[in-house]
Amino acid sequence: MSSQSTREHIHPSLHRPRSAGERPVPETLPSWVYTDPEFLTLEKEHVFRRQWLLVGHLGEIPRGGDYMTLDAVDERIFVIRGEDGRVRALHNVCRHRASRVVTGERGNCAHAITCPYHGWTYGLDGRLRGVPAERSFRDLDKSKYPLPEVEMDVWHGFVFVRISPGPGPAVRELLAPFDGELEPYRLAAMTPHRRTWTEPMDVNWKCVHDNDNEGYHVPVGHPGLRRLFGDSYGDESFPGGVSRSQAVLQERVSPVWSEGLYQRLAPGACTHLPEPGRRKWLYFGLFPNTSLGIYPDMVEFFQCFPIAPGRSILRGAAYAHPDPSRTMRVVRYLNGRINRTVWREDLDFCHWAHAGMKSSSYQGGPLSDKEVGVRQFHDRIRALLPVARRPQPPAAGSVAEENRRLSALA
């Protein structure tokens, strides 16, 4: 497509005449940003490497030498607890030949980090301590080869990293307005309930978080949630890419046994929370891809990272307070059963939406006032990548150049 034809092919809604005083209709991102590999390259740099990404929870690394890992957008990070108790985030890339220095989702390095490839050994603080056959390296200065640290922030036990210096405040500042609301949950004291899991998906990562950022689809798309919550589900957006959704279990008991039993048992099993927390499901989102579900009985997160325009990896884990009671075990089982059904429904929606982005009939659509989370999500992407404001893609090979031009004009 030539740049000239691109400029002339403007989405009709952008030039629709408006009456005096009429507010413009918020619109989604254009469909091409879901399928364009050049745009994905920009997203990796500006949306992911410069924003806060959730790694996991301090409850996963209680002892010195314990670590947890995150692989995302061609970067490898691990968070490790030192023997002094200090927690650091480091690049999981050996300074010798770029191997991983730790493997798996979680593990323990005892007193040192040893690369499994050639045996280079680092302290738990990342300093290079030992090199096999060191004399074979001419004038090697080990002090020049530590594992680089990554910017890190901890909020209520959840560990976030920012790979490259980015704009904006720390996570704890962004989410500080909700600290009082969340204090009774004692999130920092939780321990792993379900180990970190990953699942590949043949969709663009934004389709997953578009779906997660709004409850507009809940009444039609999730009949089980409608039976649980009635009409109480609502979404809100806040500065800094923060969103919150919440719903309250209704008194009317669902006729579906798993839902009805959860409604009856959860409030009584969760007496560590004051009312109405015993009946409330809370969801917090943080741009670009953190989704945190806070239930009376446990907490879980998920996030979606891009691999290719139509290929992503979903990652998540769950945490809870130790409670061996039979009632709590049943409540948590029912929670998982309900949410697995919801996720299967959401999978269909994400796949259908991604496939529709390729259709010649669709370039973008209007947003409801009930889709405030999606609007905020899309507006932040447009702010970081102004080329996303174009209804049609620039000529092949010029997406980055056009984005630089538009950024300079902003």
Image (cartoon, helix red, strand yellow):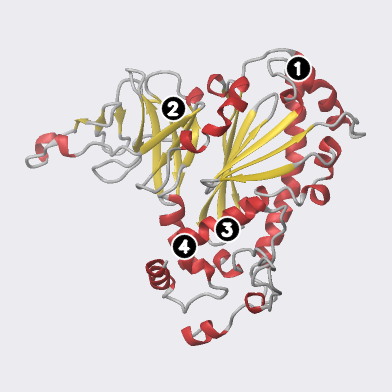
Could you tell me if the residues under marks 2 and 3 are in contact, i.e. CB atoms within 8 Å?
no
Precedes in sequence: disc 1 or disc 4? 1
Q: Amino acid at mark 2?
A: Gly
At mark 3, the secondary structure is helix
**Relative image position of residue 120 (x, y in whole percent):** 24, 34
Number of the front mark, 2 or 4 = 4
Precedes in sequence: disc 4 or disc 3? 3
Quadrant position of residue 327: top right
Quadrant position of residue 243: top right
The correct choice, above or below, for 354 with respect to 280 in the image is below
At mark 2, the secondary structure is strand
Quadrant position of residue 110: top left
For the residues labelled 3 and 1, the Cα–Cα distance comes to 39 Å
Nearer the observer, 278 or 301 = 278
The correct choice, above or below, for 363 with respect to 149 in the image is below
At mark 4, the secondary structure is loop
353 vs 6, left or right, is: right
Residue bearing mark 2: 107
Q: Which mark is residue 218?
A: none
